[in-house]
Image (cartoon, rainbow, N blue to C red):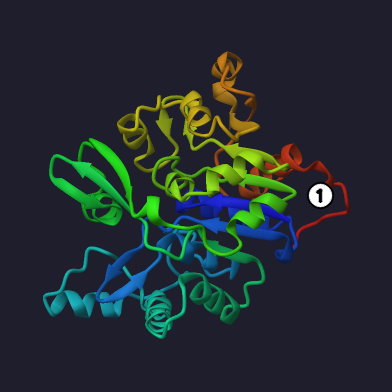
Amino acid sequence: MIVVLTGGTGGAKFVDGLRRLLPAEELTIIVNTGDDHEWWGLYVSPDVDSIVYVLADLLSSERGWGVRGDTFHCLQAMKELGEEAWFSVGDRDLATHLLRTQLLSRGQTLSEATSYIAEKLDVRSRILPMSDMRVETRIDTPAGDLSFEEYFVKRWYQDPVNSVRFSGASEAEPAPGVVDAIASAQAVLIAPSNPVTSIGPILAVPGVREALQTTPAKVVAVSPIIGSAAVSGPAANLMTAQGLPVSIAGIAKAYEDFLDILIADDSDSAAARDINIGGVTVHCTDIMMRDTEDKRRIARAALALACPEILSEPAAEFR
């Protein structure tokens, strides 16, 4: 079993590559829920939905989120009725949030609701929210204390960031199966996701970081940073706010207590030679995921470093 920790659009791209190399049943994905958000009275779990959609072959490649070919009639109607419309929810996407909210209102956990929705969409990989308890990423800015979606979507991540915290994390527990999956994995892969607000909330749940420290599996991360800039999104500002250098050294530092191998971009090969953080070794390649072949290539590189025997069989592509 291959376990992936993921969040954000970079994480969904990485999982898209992995699903093309592995049988679905061999893939377990632990997903950030710090971005979860209430919208129009509905429970939205953006990162979970992106993983469900990519594994169901429904994710919009143009947007990197939501359902391919979706329409936005409800969003427009709500805007015309004077309701907030800054969070773009498509009509088919809306059905997922309606069903999740209904399941939660009946007493199901987020894990149970996720499993039910994934099954209905014929997803055979295992998708585990990081916790069934509410953990909310909060961004402290000069404009006030913002939820991640307010900071990222509503305000286009333009505000300076003072600090980041994960409200509720200290009282949370890992969702059922999370710790066991890490402990029994053949390999653990950290997607090229924002280390602060995509992977950070997962690591903030008590027991997860400890499981990563003690797993016998190799832990391999793909950097979301090239040079001194994020491949996409606000990772650079958020890393600075958390006291991490915006570089591959900052990524290695964020994961130093459990990381074995960091995959960085070829352009960072000189910086890679200077990294001396714990037992982390760095391998360089082209890490940009521009198309399907790039996603497959990066996924294959991570698997080859973490668990080469899984690729030794005549493997081929599964989708």
Left-right relation of 241 to 114: left
Position of the C terminus by quadrant: bottom right
Q: Nearer the viewer, residue 280 or 174?
A: 174
Q: Position of residue 66 (x, y in %)?
A: 43, 66
Q: Is residue 243 above or below residue 92?
A: above
* Pointer 1 local density, CA inside 10 Å: few below 14, some 14–19, many at least 20: some
Number of residue marks: 1
Query: Given the current orientation, which residue lies at the most extreme right position?
Result: 313
Q: Position of residue 143 (x, y in %)?
A: 13, 44
Q: Is residue 319 visible?
A: no
Position of the N terminus by quadrant: bottom right
Residue at 41%, 25% (x, y): give it: 228
Residue at 49%, 59% (x, y): give it: 61
Q: Nearer the viewer, residue 297 or 181?
A: 181
Q: Secondary structure at mark 1?
A: helix
Q: Is residue 231 above or below residue 124?
A: above
Q: Is residue 171 above or below residue 196?
A: below
Q: Position of residue 30 (x, y in %)?
A: 56, 57
Left-right relation of 122 to 168: right
Left-right relation of 106 to 120: left
Q: Nearer the viewer, residue 304 or 67?
A: 304
Q: Is residue 168 visible?
A: yes
Residue at 72%, 53% (x, y): give it: 184
Left-right relation of 134 to 309: left
Q: Position of residue 62 (x, y in %)?
A: 45, 59
User: Which residue in the structure is indicated by mark 1?
Assistant: 310
Residue 94 location, quadrant: bottom left
Residue at 55%, 23% (x, y): give it: 267
- Tell me the kind of residue under disc 1: Ile
